[in-house]
Amino acid sequence: MDQRQTFEDSDELLSFVSQIFQQKQQASLLIDKDGLTRVEGTITAINEHNNVNETSIVVNNTIPFAIKEIIGINGIFRSDYSEC
């Protein structure tokens, strides 16, 4: 049986992202922004929003990605995503 670690919602993902940010760990992300894209590097900012799905992260001081666009991070995937 194929099993993988998942996160249930954006709040759980934001908690995980915040932990990686605070510990200055490398992040390997799978982003769904007009197609799947891999992004690797250091999370350099978290731009919080009242709606957690609109909260964004910045990797390597480049383009921000909304929490809702993150499919996976460091081997943990969104539970409702079945294509990876």
Image (cartoon, helix red, strand yellow):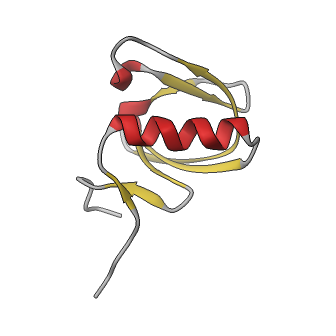
At a point 65% along the width and 43% down the height, the residue shown is: 20
Determine whether, in the image, residue 18 is placed left or right of residue 69.
Answer: right
At a point 71% along the width and 36% down the height, the residue shown is: 22
Determine whether, in the image, residue 29 is placed left or right of residue 71.
Answer: right
Determine whether, in the image, residue 37 is placed left or right of residue 69.
Answer: right
Q: Is residue 33 visible?
A: no
Res 41 quadrant in image: top right
Count every numbered label the image shows and give the total: 0
Q: Quadrant of the N terminus?
A: bottom left
Q: Quadrant of the C terminus?
A: bottom left
Q: Nearest the camera: 40 or 16?
A: 16
Give the image location of residue 68, x and y in percent: 35, 33
Res 6 quadrant in image: bottom left
Above or below, comparing residue 46 to residue 25 in the picture: above
At a point 37% along the width and 43% down the height, the residue shown is: 35
Give the image location of residue 72, x and y in percent: 45, 52
Q: Which residue is most to the bottom?
A: 1
Res 50 quadrant in image: top left
Give the image location of residue 44, x and y in percent: 71, 28
Give the image location of residue 7, x and y in percent: 36, 52
Above or below, comparing residue 62 to residue 12 in the picture: above
Q: Is residue 31 visible?
A: yes
Above or below, comparing residue 4 to residue 57 in the picture: below
Determine whether, in the image, residue 24 is placed left or right of residue 27.
Answer: right
